[in-house]
Amino acid sequence: MSILLNSESRVLVQGMTGSEGTFHTQQMIEFGTNVVAGVSPGKGGSQHLGRPVFDSVAEAVISTGATVSGVFVPPAFAADAIMEAAAAGLQLVVCITELIPVNDMVRARAYLASRGARLVGPNCPGLMSPGERSKVGIIPNQNGRPGPVGVVSRSGTLTYEIMQSLAAAGYGQSTAVGIGGDPVLGLSFSDVLELFASDPETELVVMAGEIGGSDEERAAELIGRGYPKPVVGFISGRTAPPGKRMGHAGAIISGNTGSAASKVAALERAGVEVADTIEQIVERVTARLRRG
Amino acid sequence: MSILLNSESRVLVQGMTGSEGTFHTQQMIEFGTNVVAGVSPGKGGSQHLGRPVFDSVAEAVISTGATVSGVFVPPAFAADAIMEAAAAGLQLVVCITELIPVNDMVRARAYLASRGARLVGPNCPGLMSPGERSKVGIIPNQNGRPGPVGVVSRSGTLTYEIMQSLAAAGYGQSTAVGIGGDPVLGLSFSDVLELFASDPETELVVMAGEIGGSDEERAAELIGRGYPKPVVGFISGRTAPPGKRMGHAGAIISGNTGSAASKVAALERAGVEVADTIEQIVERVTARLRRG
Amino acid sequence: MKLLEHQAKAQFRSEGIECPMGRVARTPLEAESAARELGEVVVKAQVPIGGRGKAGGVKVARTPEEARDAASQILQMEIRGYRVPAVLLEELLDIGQELYLGVTLDRDRRRLAVLLSFAGGMEIEDVAERTPEKIAKLWPDPFSGPLPFEIRQLTLNALASAQGEQVLERSRLLGMMVPLVQRLYQLCQRLDATLCEINPLVITRSGQLIAGDGKVEVDQNAEYRHQDLVRELGGDAEAASSGDDQLEVEARRRGLTYVHLGGDIGVIGNGAGLVMNTLDLVKQQGGSPANFLDIGGGAKAEVVRQALEMVLLDPEVRGIFVNIFGGITRGDEVAKGLIQARDELQIKLPLVVRMTGTREEEGRRLLEEAGIIPAVSAPEAARRVVEMVAGAGR
Amino acid sequence: MKLLEHQAKAQFRSEGIECPMGRVARTPLEAESAARELGEVVVKAQVPIGGRGKAGGVKVARTPEEARDAASQILQMEIRGYRVPAVLLEELLDIGQELYLGVTLDRDRRRLAVLLSFAGGMEIEDVAERTPEKIAKLWPDPFSGPLPFEIRQLTLNALASAQGEQVLERSRLLGMMVPLVQRLYQLCQRLDATLCEINPLVITRSGQLIAGDGKVEVDQNAEYRHQDLVRELGGDAEAASSGDDQLEVEARRRGLTYVHLGGDIGVIGNGAGLVMNTLDLVKQQGGSPANFLDIGGGAKAEVVRQALEMVLLDPEVRGIFVNIFGGITRGDEVAKGLIQARDELQIKLPLVVRMTGTREEEGRRLLEEAGIIPAVSAPEAARRVVEMVAGAGR
């Protein structure tokens, strides 16, 4: 099993005919993802990567029964693409695009909330369920390995590092989810933790947060109320100064919120072991999985 | 029994301290309506007609447990008042105000749809459940009499006429609902018919339509699919010329829709007896209720 | 309130919707000098009504002199009763295709609808009746307005029924329709309009989208929010209402809810439904109603007097039927008001009054004593007034 | 992008939000003549940062001569590192009460929040920390914006914690707040701002609501939609960024995602999370990172060269740590890029590279051959670079 994405998922790619879309759709197909369609307004009726291309998500869904969308369109059009996917009834939308205006995302987020669609991202690497041979996004194929660890992280490369280090130690992932580095995100840490809680394959969760916002603190509250699986935490940006945007639009300590110290403290209060390095993550996962 | 309004209904009046609001609230109280509060922004904390006045609907609901609102505020503020009532969790909003800009109502209608609140009106006389001694709106008290006839009508005075004529012949009403004469309304004929269908007190429905729009045609479709109770129809405006607004903002034949002939034909196709005069309404009600 | 074409286009431009270059002229000389600036032009009568083309109100002029002559002719016309206060001169467009785009109130859906069709340049009602599949529709959420993907789908749906070759390639058309539809919808919201229509929406051979004609109707209930527009229209108001029924124009001036119907029995009542029903009763009795006049809910004596006065302005009227449902108003008071008004206005015509509600007995007695015919039921009253008018006519 | 006060107020005015009468002056003489028009004025330094009052950047002037002298002093100031390009002279307000009104992004709620408090004129963060109950909040639906009844409730909630006598009677205040909040929210949407703040929002003794100060921050990701504002700000851009770290200004010019941290170990990596983690590792090993530099996902050789160049602009840097996770990029290619860049830029400082992913073995061998220190793990690399810099420093 896995969360969000499995071998039944029928994936369409918005912006598949673009260069990023083309490259990563190829990777997704190689990984085993069931990519059923592409959407590029004005290019409907053509074929790309052996898949039919449609003018709209609605038309693609009718023809192919797609259930999940990966969004690779430029920032000015990405929020609209997300809403289009939700309006067409897709239950999961994964938006890789970065640099989307934040008020666009505020609107898209509200639109999705009223339609029950789930969003991963934006500005994220997407997600991968290795045991199901399915991924949507840009997580490198070689980092996936089936196993009992659920990974949820804000950062892309850090997700890859964690997956690779776990794999090197013999631990695969049920699903790895990069929730993204923007201030306004779709799924939060708490949302993903709740999904992992009821996934039988997932035995342990690695949660890698970073400075900015208070999603980590809220996840800690969730865990503190009693979480059924061990969680290994990790927070990057301990040395970041306040008021500076550390690469990610969302990685900024503003006023009194968002510091690494506050997040580490909240997680530890909730009984989460917080690792200082990726190597320590692997050690703690090892210890927990042996113990459990 | 009755529909929409009964002796348990706890009514607040938005705009109670205005002159219209004051007069009709008095009438409602005299009729037996359980008026629990008034709302007038800026006048919170005072008393009016022996009822507490609040600054907002939310505050009135918290303090008094109101379940229904009657809206008597001027047209420029009425759509906002309707939304305020829905946001505060009221399940029924009755808007008497006329001359509300139609696009304001389009927005208010969409707002209510997402909150499950029912709206009667605007530009309507409101509704009355005589057996429950409860009314919200401006239907004259002396016209109400408990009984088995459900009345639904677009027009105010026509509703009163029908109620009075029925009463004179010995037939009271379960509930009488004036749905209003505007182009954009809350409850439609179909909505009210569906409520009457499952109300045990209602044995027969009188439906008084008029030219404009196609709500009567849609009600006819509903009845045509099989309606459990006899319906006596009535359509006014048979002599109205196309393109002219006959008093009601909504009473206008535009293009090919809205003529009385089309409505009468649709109702008759659905098996509804359509009366030509109010006297005929009474005759047909008499015949049907004796038969049934 | 209906805007004239040039006013609608000024609104279009303020929202960023492209229109042909144009000038308004109120004299043939102004038209000539406008044409000198614009080159070859089309000269269009500015009247708040359709069908001006068939009536000769639209002419092409190749030279400034032709424009002067065309304007001279058109400015003297009366189109379906409307005088022409001005002409609009516009550059000729290199038309590739003609579409229809409109935002209009859809009563059934309780929303504004966006309508798009590749069958442009025709009356949309005719298209809707004959080939409804050629009109694509969208009902945007009123708070979000039409979203880009919704507009693309609307365009795709309209394209599905379009015939012949397209001037614009699909991806370009999809991209251009998004801001255009958003702007037209935004305009409709900003003006509190119930109709904003571009017909034809011209796609030029060079691939531009341009509003060939423009129609805007502002919701009467919202005019208080658009006093600037009301004032602006004021300049052409007299001409703009010249084609309207002159009795109705007078009633509007007096603030009365009156519709002229052309018969000989004046009808007054309270409540729109009741008055419509009263008209129907007169007709059922073989009579011919002269008008609709609704004096509203709380009928006061003074309002009754004003209504009688209005009805008597119509020289065709030979009898009057007053139908009052006294809900809150007392019957005796209405009766007193009626008698007083009859005396003040020296009404000699048959006056039949049907009155019901509180104290109707007292009221009826008062009327009878004053020689006004009271009736118990509305059909009875209708029968009597029809009979009396027919009798008087003999 | 942060607007200066006078720019924010120009935006406020365009949305119909009332501001004090004012003039911008860039010289003492301009200030003097502005004061001649305005009468008694307050002279305010235009810098994109708070705390200018404490720093002496705000002075009251009773006469034009006083205004000239005040402007002369303020225009020579440097406030927390920022030069003062201009002063704003404004009429003195007859202050009755000071409120706080702001629209700001609330990350937790994923919406814009409207904040209103009767504790105005103070830093809102301080109010939020000490007396959070004094701030009323509203999270409007982003499509509808704040609805009138929501704004009234917000105002009622804020009033509930207000102390002392109110200048405006309640019904009047409720009525006035509705358009004001709607306009400020509308402005925030129109400018794609993440913050639009009026602090203090002044209620004058005569009962007007006037924006005493104005703060607007436009979302960096949306600047492409506001090129006019970017250009307008351009005039004062040099001064506006004068207080910023000069290395960061240079990095922005080069289009690099760089933050100066003040230590001596330059850090380069791909991915924000990875780079932040790399800084943490350096610190854990007792080192002091000089900077954050994220070269993004698909690291190419040329980008690596530019990054190294940037890091070397910092004279404090004594060693460099490059941490690359090769997801799609091949390790050998990154290695080649690094070697080439090292040679071209003639880098003599210790350069430790940790590289993982596809073909990492080949990459590591290439680096070793070229005398660049490859490391297997990131902590190991951090330890080595810290040691080497410490050693070199001895």
Image (cartoon, coloured by chain):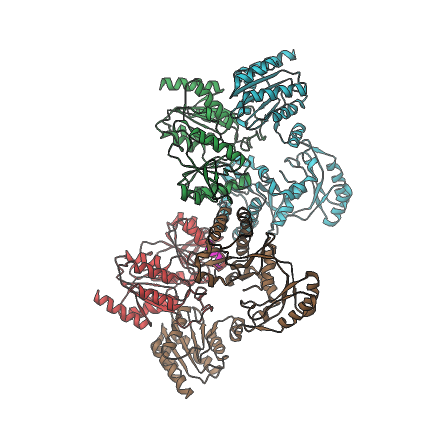
Chain colours: A green, B red, C brown, D cyan
Residue D309 vertical placement versus A76 (above, below): above
From the image, give the main secondary structure of the stretch colored magenta.
Answer: helix
Residue B2 shown left or right of residue C114 in the figure: left
Residue B36 vertical placement versus C303 (above, below): above
Which quadrant holds the N terminus of chain D? Answer: top right
* Quarter of the figure with residue B147: bottom left
- Residue D380, position as x, y percentages in the image: 53, 15
Q: Residue at x 66, y 16 (%)?
A: D348
Q: Residue furthest left?
A: B291
Magenta extent = B100-107
Q: Which residue lies furthest to the front in this view?
A: C164
Q: Can residue A82 be seen in this view?
A: yes
- Residue A31, position as x, y percentages in the image: 44, 28
The stretch drawn in magenta includes residue D77: no
Residue D184 shown left or right of residue B220 in the figure: right
Residue B89 vertical placement versus A205 (above, below): below
Which quadrant holds the C terminus of chain D? Answer: top right
Q: Which residue lies furthest to the bottom in this view?
A: C394
Residue D243 vertical placement versus B226 (above, below): above
- Residue C102, position as x, y percentages in the image: 51, 57
- Residue A227, position as x, y percentages in the image: 38, 28
